[in-house]
């Protein structure tokens, strides 16, 4: 599915919708260049889960946990991760196998340890369509 947005607010609302419908154990992966709107999207998703706390990129930790919503929310930013082994050390498997909702920014860096069942979100700019245009592609890989 492809959704096109023209403002941060619209991207926030796409995230919010997904957050409202997220189920226990759901894993979202989020891919896209710096400044494309990954954090805006994540803030919307958190809002959709009922989280009122401010959500920012977890700069100093790999994972930030939010417990104030309908389901626990685990926000990963693996941009600074050395390798997939480092993810095991922080208990990645326990997070993604739990009942919370996980969202992993820069997920392509840990592709080999991602669960097969996941919702992939790709956000892209297209400057020909304007500075605030974003194309959001939502894809669930075939598990068979
Ligand atoms: P990332 O986390 O991917 O590095 P951010 O979410 O921090 O990116 O920042 C995205 C920036 O792009 C913000 O300054 C936001 O206002 C701006 N922006 C402009 N148009 C959009 C849009 N359609 N969707 C999301 N962000 C947008
Ligand atoms: Mg960010």
Image (cartoon, rainbow, N blue to C red):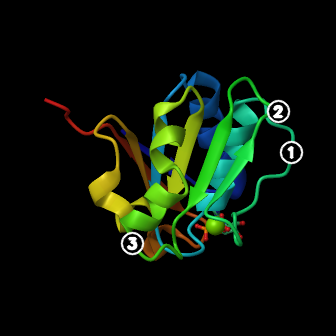
- First-in-chain label (3 vs 1): 1
Circle 3 sits in a helix, a strand or a loop, which is it? loop
Q: Give the residue number, with chain letter if any, for mark 1.
A: 53
Mark 3 neighbour class, 10 Å CA radius: few under 14, some 14 to 19, many 20 or more: few
Which mark's residue is nearer the viewer, 3 or 1?
3
Residue 68, label in figure = 2
Q: Is residue 65 above or below residue 142?
A: below
- Residue at 64% x, 25% y is 20
The quarter of the rendered structure image containing the C terminus is top left
Residue 31 at least partly seen:
no
Q: Position of residue 91 (x, y in %)?
A: 52, 50
Furthest-left residue in this view = 144
- First-in-chain label (1 vs 2): 1
User: Do tag 3 and tag 1 residues touch (Cβ < 8 Å)?
Assistant: no
- Residue at 68% x, 47% y is 12
Q: Give the residue number, with chain letter if any, for mark 3.
A: 83
* Viewer-proximal residue among 45 and 96: 96
């Amino acid at each position: 599915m492809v959704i096109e947005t023209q403002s941060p607010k619209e991207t926030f609302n796409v995230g919010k919708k997904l957050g409202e419908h997220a189920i226990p154990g759901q894993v979202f992966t989020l891919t896209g260049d710096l400044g494309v709107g990954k954090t805006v999207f994540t803030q919307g998703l958190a809002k959709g889960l009922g989280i009122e706390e401010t959500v920012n990129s977890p700069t100093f930790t790999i994972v930030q946990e939010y417990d104030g919503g309908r389901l626990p929310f685990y926000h990963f930013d693996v941009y600074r991760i050395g390798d997939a082994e480092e993810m095991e050390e922080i208990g990645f498997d326990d997070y993604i196998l739990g009942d919370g909702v996980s969202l992993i920014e820069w997920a392509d860096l840990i592709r080999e340890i991602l669960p097969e069942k996941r919702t992939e979100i790709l956000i892209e700019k297209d400057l020909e369509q304007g500075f605030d245009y974003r194309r959001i592609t939502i894809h669930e890989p075939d598990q068979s």
